[in-house]
Image (cartoon, rainbow, N blue to C red):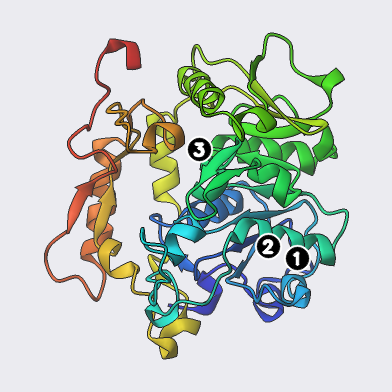
Amino acid sequence: MLLADFLPISIEDMKARGYDSLDFICVSGDAYVDHPSFGIAIVTRLLEYMGFKVGIIPQPNWKDKNDFMKLGKPNIAFLVSSGNIDSMVNHYTAAKRKRHDDIYSPGGKSGYRPDRAVIVYCNRIREAYKDVPIIIGGIEASLRRFAHYDYWDDRVRNSILVDSSADLLIYGMGENPLLEIGNLLKYGKNIKDIKDIRGTCYMADENSLPKDAIELPSFEKVSQDKMEYAKAFKIQFQEQDAVTGKALYQKHGLKYLVQNPPQYPLSTETMDLVYRLPYMRTYHPIYENLGGIPAIKEVEFSITSHRGCFGSCSFCALAFHQGRVIQRRSDESIIEEAEKLTKSKDFKGYINDIGGPTANFLEPSCKKQL
């Protein structure tokens, strides 16, 4: 295993690859683990596959803007994610007590990321580069895209797009929208003009709202009236289907948060491509002397076979993040990955599991989901 096999995390890594600059720089609240169970690994490897030069700033020092400048200014955009878990869930128990461990950080220790990581990271990037496009995504951005109740503050907060001052928010699975956005920016389109890509949210003025979009009760209303909050959530839920879902908008002060319709489910061919990318399937060597990254232990010899869940349980956010349609890989792709696992020096003779977030829901539930 060579350092050059990982994506750049330093100027030295960039020079080793012959890069003078990067197209995209990904800022993550997790340590750098190049494994397809980590969203940032999928996003960066997919962009690399499309021909973009990509670097990663994992768990930057959020108190110093210089840490966000160590790879220079990206040619296209910064991509920001809190990591695999919402940063507040990662930091606090249900009793609102501070957690002392973090399996996505070196040695399993906490303290490597801030509370509300997406907002903090975006603010630091704005301090460093005022005009650079910022695109946010991941679980924290996706599930906080509308005005939402925050358990830790015990109040309704703005859309995270408002508080972060980012330019675009990608909700749900990021592959398709990110590739569309990347190509548009690459060929000179202003990020302020990208307003029609499925699976994205942006801020708009009253005179530039999309036609036929459905209005949600405003932030001001849902933060004061529980019935208005319930009404807003019902509309969001009903318009979550990629085929029938319409664009939504919600007033926040003088601006409007606009959510484009959900992206279409990933095809089997795209799923196969995503999981065939050249992941190192482990954490970056810089963490070796710090105790490694504990999160890899659970997934190192696991295989993702599908995404999505048609269960739509009231206590679960999967329908809002991965969608209700089962998106599965081909049997050939799964077998190919299994064969790769057997060649690992740490392979003990068994694969932990083959599945996804949905227990035994391995196929679309009916013809309507095909």
Q: Is residue 193 visible?
A: yes
Characterize the local packing of mark 3: few (<14), some (14-19) or many (20 or more) Cα atoms within 10 angstroms. Answer: many
Query: Which residue, given by chain and number where applicable, does mark 1 sit on?
Result: 124
Rounded to the nearest whole Å, what is the CA distance between mark 2 and mark 1?
A: 5 Å
Kind of residue at badge 2: Tyr
Relative placement, left or right, of 123 versus 200 is right
Relative placement, left or right, of 5 versus 221 is left
Residue 352 rendering spot, x and y as whole percentages: 17, 58
Rounded to the nearest whole Å, what is the CA distance between mark 2 and mark 3?
A: 20 Å
Query: Which residue, given by chain and number where applicable, does mark 3 sit on?
Result: 172
Please count the marks in the image. Answer: 3
Q: Residue at x 67, y 72 (%)?
A: 62
Relative placement, left or right, of 120 versus 253 is left
Kind of residue at badge 3: Gly
Say if mark 3 contacts mark 1, CB within 8 Å. no
Query: Which residue, given by chain and number where applicable, does mark 2 sit on?
Result: 121
